[in-house]
Image (spheres, rainbow, N blue to C red):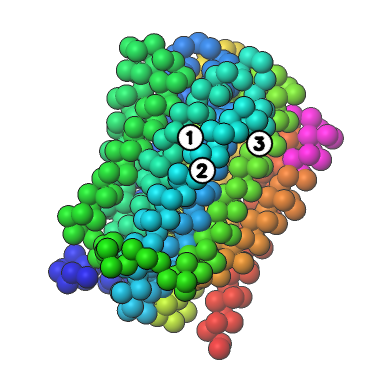
Amino acid sequence: MSNNSKDDKRIYILKEERPAKAIVALGVPLVMGMSIMVLYNLVDTFFIGLLHDDYQMAAVNLAYPVMMILIAISNVVGAGSASLISRSMGAEDYAKASHTLTSGFLLTIVGSAIVAALGLAFLPALVEMLGAQSNTFDFTRQYVMIILIGCLCIMGNYTFGQFLRSEGSVKYSIAGMVVGTAANIVLDPIFIFALGMEIRGAAIATVLGNALGMAVSIWFYAKGKTLLRPAVRYIRPTGEIMKEIFWVGVPAGLETLLTSIAFVVNNNLAVAYGELTVAAMGIAQKIMTLGGYIYQGFAAGSQPLMGYNYGAKNYHRMLQVLKAGILVVSGIELVVMVIFGVFAPYLIDIFSNTPEVIATGSKVLRAFMCILPFVGAVSMSRMSFQAMGKPQYAFGITLVRQLILYIPLLLLLNHVFGFDGMIWAQPITEVIMMAASVTLLVRVIRREWNR
C-alpha cells in the first residue's frame, strides 16, 4: 500500500470526515457516474427509437433482464469482495484486502466464461422465457446473443468498479463509467445506422463500451494509482476468503436475480396488454433508471463508510452515516419525482412518437416515480448489511420485498384492477419496505454496539 497524501485523504473520509460530508464526497461522484451510465440504456433506446420500429424497441426491453442477470452474477463477486476489502482495511489487514482483490479478479474471469457458455447453449429457451413473441423473438435473440458473447466486458466493468469503490477510490471507479458511456454514444449510431446492423449494432456498441470501461479500471491498478492492487502471490484464493466472499456475495447476487425475476413477471403481464405496452413500459423503466442511479449511487457510496467503520467497531459513526444518507437521498429524490411527474409526456416523446406509447409510458412513469422518496432508504439498508458482512439481513429484505410483497401484489392488483393496478404494485411495496428495513438496520447496529 502506498502512503501519499491522496491515500491519507481517502482514509480520512472513511474514518473521520463529518457523516453528511463523507456521504456527499463518496456518493455524489458515484451518482454522477451512474447517471452517465443511464445513457448505456437510454442511448440504445433512443437510437432504436429512430428506426421507428416499436418491435425492436420492445425487444430491447425484453432483453434487459439478461443484463440484470449478468449484474446479479457480478454482484456475487463484486459485493462479496468489496465488503471483505472494506472490513479488512478497517481492521488494518491490508494483506487480506489485497488477497481478496486478486481473488475477485480471478472469479470474475472464470464466472463470465461459464455464463457465456451456458447462456449460448440454451439461447432459444432463454429468449422464449423472457416473453418474446413472434414479432419480437428474432430481435430479442440477436441482442441477447451478442450480450452473452461479450459478458466478460459487462461483468468486469461492474465488478472492477466495485473493487475500486471498496477502498474509497470513487473517482477512479466512475472514470470507467464515463469512458464506456461516451464510447457507447459514439458507437451506437455507427453500428445501428452507418453499418445497418440495427438492434445487433446496439448490442455490439454496449459490449464495446463496457470493454473500454473495464480497461480503464485495469489501467488504474496497473499504474499503481490505487491503495490496493492485485498480485501474483495472491492468485490462489484461500478457503477463508472464498467463504467470506460467497457468504456476502451469493445473497447479494440473489437479490439482483430476484429483481430480474420480478422484471420478467412484470413484462409477461404487460404482454397481455399488447407489445406496444411493453415498449412503453420499457421506455418508462429506462427513464426511471436516472432516479434509480441517484439512490444507488449514495447507497454504494455509503458501503465503504459502513464497512470500514464496522471493521473499526465505530458503531456511533455508522448510525450517523445512515441518518445523513437517508436525509440527503430522500430530499434529492423528491425533487426528481416532481420533475418526472411534470415532464413525463415530453420525456417519453423523446424515444417514441407513437401516441399509444406516449400515453401509456407517461402513466407508467408517473406511477413509478412515487417510489423515489422511499426506495433510497431501502437500498442504503441493504448495502449497509452487505458492508457489515451480514448478508442474511440484506437478502431477507429483498426476499420480503420481491417475493412476499411485490410479485404477489403485482399479480393481485393486475387481476383486480388491470394494468392500472399492476403499475402501482411497486410504490406500495417500497413504502412498506422503507419502514421495515431502516428499523431492522438500526436495531442490528445498536445490538452490536451494546455488545
Which dot, 3 or 2, sits closer to the camera? 2
Q: Position of residue 416 (x, y in %)?
A: 84, 35
Q: Secondary structure at mark 2?
A: helix
Residue, far bottom: 451
Residue 91 in view here: yes
Q: Main secondary structure of the magenta part?
A: helix
- How much space separates mark 3 and mark 2, taking CA atoms? 19 Å
Magenta residue span = 409-419
Q: What x and y, as percent, mark residue 37?
A: 39, 39
Q: Label 2 belongs to which residue? A: 115
Q: Mark 3 = which residue?
A: 264
Residue farthest right in this picture: 416
Q: Nearer the viewer, mark 3 or mark 1?
A: 1
Q: Earlier in the sequence, mark 3 or mark 1?
A: 1
Q: Which residue is mark 1?
A: 148
Crowd around label 1: few <14 · some 14–19 · many ≥20 (10 Å):
many
Q: Which residue appears at 37% of the width and 45% of the height?
A: 157
Specify the amino acid type for callout 3.
Answer: Val
Q: Which kind of residue does numbered mark 1 sit on? A: Leu
SS for dot 1: helix
* Quadrant of the snapshot with the N terminus: bottom left
